[in-house]
Amino acid sequence: MLKLSGVMPALVTPFDGAGQIDFSALGAHMTNLRAAGVTGWVPCGSSGEYNLMTDAERDSVLAFVKTFAKPGEMLIAGTNAPHTAGVIANTLRAKDLGYDAVLLAVPFYTKPTQAEIIRHFNAVTEATDMNIVLYSYPGKDGVEIQYEALDALADNPRIIGIKESSGVLQRAIGIATRYEGRIQLVSGSDDIALDFMFWGADSWICGPANCMGRAVCDLDRSFRAGDLVKAKAQMATLYTAMNILESGKFVQKLKYGCELQGTPVGECRMPLGALTNDEKAAFAAAMQPIIHWK
């Protein structure tokens, strides 16, 4: 089984003033994240506004990230679509580009049953022979990948992990204990990431890494080194800003955070709207100890 480890940013997609993908900004952004110590790249996920891009745009981002990546850096592509045929087509293109795995939520807008979820993911693995990291985010997708589906998928050798983003710690503990050695637990609830680590998550597909790269990588390193006291203090410092991220306008705040860190990545595409001055002020205040991380 492909082993997932470390902090892998769920990359934002920079846009220029004309609304086009800004590859120069993306390169500068990724250079800073590499310096912070990330272990791989996850483009075209929800943090990357994949649902607001054309297939050609998404392919261009995947190609850029693949070219930028160095040997040993994990490559996980977001290849979601609203239907199984689209997911298969997107996944095959990512495979042709040389990606190690894909990150897949349930097809959006459909709210499939657990039986339909099982059928969908089995169809994708059968058609693509590609490693899949499941993405369970019921708050966004309206449906959870429940134990019924996970039980049926756990012995599929291509289902290698699950990014758990319910925000419910009991759910993470359940996955870690129920599927140990079969499905890797991937941290996807950022404000309780340290708890995920304690329960066996060796990897973190992390949207906040875009604007908190050094801090979240330091937290991961502290935990792996066994310094739990330091890791707890670091999580406490990160918590307020992460909690604000989770309160709404997540991607807008990620992009504003990049601006605060000195690597601007432009605005979000419509229908995502701009932050208010009050929202900017609150997030900027919470970001100060992260910008000046020690």
Image: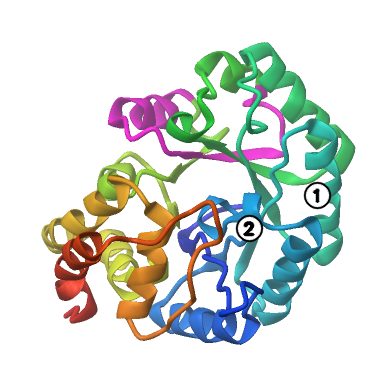
Look at the picture and state if 164 lies above or below 94: above
Which region is colored magenta? 153-178
- Residue 231 rendering spot, x and y as whole percentages: 19, 60
227 horizontally vs 197: left or right: left
- Residue 31 rendering spot, x and y as whole percentages: 51, 85
Label 1 and label 2: CA atoms lie apart by 11 Å
Q: Residue at x 18, y 67 (%)?
A: 281
Residue under circle 1? 90
Which part of the image, by quadrant, shows the C terminus? bottom left
Q: Residues within 10 Å of mark 1 (few under 14, many from 20)?
A: many
Looking at the image, is mark 1 or mark 2 earlier in the sequence? 2
Look at the picture and state if 91 lies above or below 119: below
Name the quadrant containing residue 86. Answer: top right
Residue under circle 2? 44
Q: Residue at x 56, y 80 (%)?
A: 17
Q: Nearer the viewer, residue 211 or 173?
A: 211
Residue contact between numbered discs 1 and 2, judged by CB atoms under 8 Å? no
Residue 5: in magenta span: no
